[in-house]
Amino acid sequence: VNCGGGGGRVGEGGPAAIYDVAEEMVSALQGSVPVIAQPNAGHPKRVGHRNIYMATDEYFLVYAKRLFKLGVRMVGGCCGTRPDHIASAASAVRMFGGGGDILPPAAPAEGALKKKAVAVKPVVIMDPIPVAQRTSLAAKVRRVWEGRLAGGTRRQAPLGPEDFVVSVEVNPSPGLSTEKPVGIAKMLRAKGVDVVNIADGPRATVRMSNTALGQAMMTEAGTEAIIHVCCRDRNLLGLMSDLLGNYTRELHNLVIITGDPPKMGDYPKATAVFDLDSVGLLKLVSGLNQGIDPAGREFGGQSKFFAATGAEPGAVDYTREMRRLRDKIDAGAEMVMTQPVYDPAVMRKFLDDVSAFPKPVPVLIGLCPLVSSRNADFLHNEVPGMSVPQDIRDRMSAVGGGPDGIAEGVKIAKEMLDQFKDEVVGCYIMPQLGKYEQAASVLDHMGYGQPDSVARRDAGNVA
């Protein structure tokens, strides 16, 4: 389907009109024939003596991603589209695992080098530093993975903080102060939590740099941090620069993600970059760990980043999600942190499928303790990648909100954790609405929040 014209909404032209038609085609064909969409740049507007097409490249990017998510196999452009529009479509391709990442320039032909008499120094690719020697978090993950879980071949319940890894998400507060999140990090560390997880502009909102907060937490709270790095806001040069800067700040634990589009957040007109997707960025980080920059050159050092990645066990297109996860692991992901799941059958299938990968990796199960019925409905209906089953929403509806809602949410999270704690290295807790104390109580039956929690956690790390 191409261009856009005729009556009704299609008569408006542009990506939105083509999306409507493509949606019907994909539904009718059910994958029997690939669908190609080539929208124009919107209905032209007469400005002076010229016809100006009104769809921007950013708008084109949004609909290119929607088309790919719908199941369209190829997106191009028709009337009024420019190279900027096609570049936006290419960015969308990279987000969905197609196309190519930005690659190093091809090496000069051997004959050309002889003509110029240029001596080429061989590039030395270093062996990565062993994972257990990179960070304290990496060391504990490997110890639990290779010890309690025998590399994913054994199911064994954890004893407590000594052989279970816990990360809690604490994001920057609006404004300029780090006081509140640093105070939360201190409280969590005192309860036996291993590491604090800091998102990178979650849901495309504007907050203080997570690297600045991560450094404050390390120096003021004495806790290790995992820094999210997303591909949305920085081009290849910016990502590389930030990674090198993070390394000098001792921020070596990373969660590599593609990132939410700006349309979801407070500044929908902000430009999305997406030079790389999460697979491309993981390859870049793996190169740095071998002393190689994105152009294939030695960069004068060797990093020791510990790179995790995200996964969505309840993804609508589960086949694609698992294919992407395999690609991420092949690109260098050393741990998987899942989105919250409230359906045990969904998590059961995911863990079974990950264990069957050629290269299984440690998993942190994602937990998001609900706080009220409204909170459950919001997550289910408004947050991409989140699904709260009807039976869970019914349980939250029966208690409403307030203390009873919080208690029921903690109970639900504990039930999910207890079903799978014997086959994951740990959990990743995402507190809702600032309920950090209540979120930490998800772990109290496992020895967290007790007088000896810190000693048990630290003794395990020494061992």
Image (cartoon, rainbow, N blue to C red):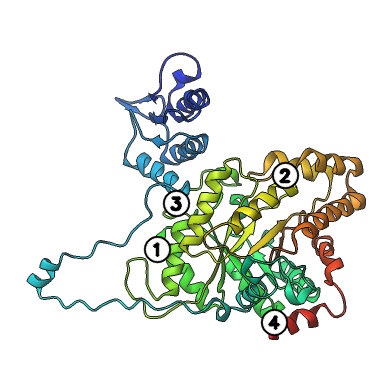
Residue at x-position 29% and y-position 25%: 49
Quarter in which the C terminus is drawn: bottom right
Total of numbered circles in the picture? 4
| Marks 2 and 3, the one that precedes in the sequence | 3
Image position of 263 with respect to 190: above or below: above
For label 2, the crowd category at 10 Å Cα-Cα, with few meaning under 14, some 14 to 19 and many 20 or more, is some
Residue at x-position 34% and y-position 29%: 78
Residue type at mark 1: give it.
Leu
For label 4, the crowd category at 10 Å Cα-Cα, with few meaning under 14, some 14 to 19 and many 20 or more, is some
| Marks 3 and 4, the one that precedes in the sequence | 3
Residue type at mark 2: give it.
Leu
Give residue 26's position: percent from left, percent from top: 49, 27
What is the distance, in whole Å, between disc 1 and disc 2 at their CAs?
A: 35 Å
Q: Can you tell which quarter of the image residue 179 is in?
A: bottom right
Residue type at mark 4: give it.
Asn
Residue type at mark 3: give it.
Val
**Left or right: residue 193 compared with residue 199:** right
Query: Which residue has dot 3 on it?
Result: 273
Query: Which residue has dot 4 on it?
Result: 461
Can you tell which mark lies on residue 237? 1
